[in-house]
Image (tube, rainbow, N blue to C red):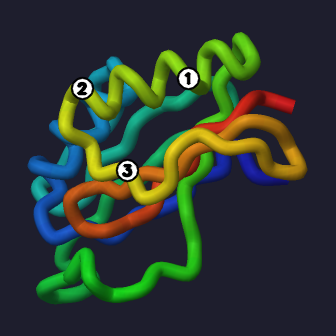
């Protein structure tokens, strides 16, 4: 059984990406090297940012995966997060809408990686 699940997001510049993710998550990295940075998201979950794996990632390249941040507090918290991110200038790919699992919206980081915010099950 793994001690932690760590989704890894490929980025062009790990420190710049860490500033973006730190701002939207409201937290500081838990581990940092020049090319790899992680955030401790809670027991058993981390988020890794890795640069240098691919060169010149472009936001224009279609992505087939996404990081999903499940928030407590139901639809009101999803709406509040959407408004907060929108005010910060985060790229919004799809505004809040109902999906099979509840209210959700889709955003992108500066490298074009998808970030979904949804209600916690």
26 in relation to 100, above or below = above
Instruction: Label 3: state its secondary structure.
Output: strand
Residue 105 x %, y %: 57, 45
User: Is residue 51 left or right of 34 when viewed as pictured?
Assistant: right
User: Is residue 96 left or right of 37 when viewed as pictured?
Assistant: right
Residue 65's tag is none
Of the two numbered discs 3 and 2 on the same chain, state the one appearing first in sequence.
2
Quarter of the C terminus within the rendering: top right
Instruction: Label 1: state its secondary structure.
Output: helix
Residue at image mark 2: 87
Residue at screen point 15% across, 88% down:
55
101 in relation to 70, above or below = below
Q: Residues within 10 Å of mark 2 (few under 14, many from 20)?
A: few
Is residue 45 visible in the rendered image? The answer is: no
Residue 64 x %, y %: 56, 81
Q: Residues within 10 Å of mark 3 (few under 14, many from 20)?
A: some
Q: CA distance from mark 2 to mark 1?
A: 12 Å
Which of the 4 image quarters holds residue 54? Answer: bottom left
Q: Nearer the viewer, residue 31 or 69?
A: 69
Q: CA distance from mark 3 to mark 2?
A: 11 Å
Of the two numbered discs 1 and 3 on the same chain, state the one appearing first in sequence.
1
Residue at image mark 1: 79
Q: How many marks?
A: 3
Instruction: Label 2: state its secondary structure.
Output: helix
Q: Nearer the viewer, residue 116 or 47?
A: 116
Marks 1 & 3, CB-CB < 8 Å contact: no
Residue at image mark 3: 92
Which of the 4 image quarters holds residue 12? Answer: bottom left
Residue 30 x %, y %: 35, 30
């Amino acid at each position: 059984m793994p001690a932690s699940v760590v989704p890894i997001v490929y980025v062009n510049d790990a420190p710049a990406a860490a500033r973006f993710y730190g701002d939207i998550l409201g937290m500081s990295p838990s581990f940092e090297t020049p090319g790899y940075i992680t955030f401790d998201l809670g027991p058993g979950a981390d988020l890794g940012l890795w640069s240098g794996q691919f060169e010149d990632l472009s936001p224009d390249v279609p992505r087939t995966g996404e990081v999903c941040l499940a928030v407590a507090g139901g639809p009101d918290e999803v709406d509040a997060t959407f408004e907060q991110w929108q005010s910060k200038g985060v790229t919004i790919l799809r505004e809040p809408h109902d999906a099979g699992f509840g209210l959700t919206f889709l955003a992108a980081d500066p490298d074009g990686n998808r970030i979904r915010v949804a209600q916690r099950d």
